[in-house]
Image (cartoon, grey):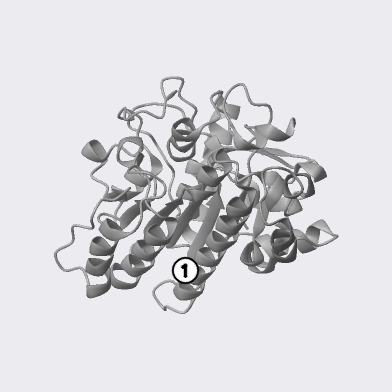
Amino acid sequence: MKKMITIAMLFAIAFNVHAQSHKTQNIIIVTLDGMRWQDVFRGADSALINSKFTNDKDEVKKKFWAPAAAERRKMLFPFLWSVVSEKGQVYGNRDLGNKDEVANQYRFSYPGYNEIFTGFPDVRMNTNDAIVNPNMNVLEFINKQKGYAGKVIAFSSWERFPQILNVNRSGLPVYSGYADLKNADANARLKFLNDLQKDVPRYLGDSTRSDFITYEFTKEYIKQYKPRVAYMAFDETDDMAHEGNYKAYLERARQEDGFIRTIWEMVQADPFYKDKTTLLITCDHGRGEMPLDSWRNHGADVKGAEQTWFAVIGPDTKVLGEIKTPTSTYHKQLAQTIAQLLGLDFKANAGHEVGEAITTVFK
């Protein structure tokens, strides 16, 4: 018993030291729905470029192809591989033995986002339907902490996040799909975006708006309201993959990398955020690889759909670059990692388990 108490005391002391010394006061979280680790780390896939899934093959090769994987991936994700990898950490290159995975068995969106934000895979979260998530999420937890109330915001292209984040219970402002921003004092640009999204072509259907609109809302909201925690959820990489359009999938991925760069450069130029903000980028699930047609799909029956990745950069993150150690991380660990980057310890009031933080992220 004495030994157990001593270990617990030592852990508490260590956590308190971290909480006192950490520099991160704000965090930006970005997800790219269904973005494969293979493309993140290897760049464009020659098998897919030369397949029926790619139109304008010569144009795609000009934009995205180079002989070496290191060149190709930088062409696809220039910000990730020129800034984040140089000053932060990137996890999930299975070619090097470094594995990042979802722990849930379903391997599609709602279960994936539940795992990221609640810290555990819940077998009840097994649908993309509009069921209300009973589990406390880390954004809700942060919003209840001193100094963070009313300073947490989420914008998503997919309409399902009000249920995933349980806005009726959490009270979080979550603007998903074609929902208007409701702030009466919103600036002219935000009001224009409310109007614009009603008129843009709904090529993704009535449930998912353009990632460009989601990005513009997030960017302008950060400029005006200075949230402490902002979540931006993109969707078009998943949509283009399901359509079997590899060219559009690559183009959306590079565009979203550019969106992330713009927001990161914007916050680093703002004294409110500069050197006090951590950026975490990830996805909700992986996709298939073999047979080739399986790249379009994911789910419990798709081999490889559990394989994911994440990246992090900020003042409390060791500069390790691409993680090359043969270790495994899981998305159920991200909620506690997010909390501890802010000097907090995520405790779920509902009593559900919470995955341990990924300790290698921290200095």
From what the image shows, is residue 296 above or below residue 182? above
Which quadrant: the N terminus? top right
Is 228 placed left or right of 311 in the picture?
Answer: left
Question: Is 175 in front, or is 92?
Answer: 175
Q: Residue at x 30, y 29 (%)?
A: 132
Decide: few, some or many residues near mark 1? Use Cα within 10 Å; few <14, some 14-19, many ≥20. many
Q: Residue at x 46, y 75 (%)?
A: 266
Residue lying at the far right in this picture: please name it.
Answer: 67
From what the image shows, is residue 316 above or below residue 33? below
Q: Position of residue 152 (x, y in %)?
A: 32, 55
Q: Residue at x 74, y 44 (%)?
A: 51
Query: Looking at the image, how many numbered discs can be counted on the residues?
Result: 1
Residue, disc 1: 263
Is 336 placed left or right of 206 in the picture?
Answer: right
Q: Position of residue 96 (x, y in %)?
A: 81, 45
- Work out whether residue 75 can be spotted: yes
Q: Residue at x 47, y 48 (%)?
A: 235
Q: Position of residue 283 (x, y in %)?
A: 55, 45
Q: Quadrant of residue 161?
A: top left
Residue type beneath disc 1: Ile
Disc 1 secondary structure class: helix
From what the image shows, is residue 243 above or below residue 279? above
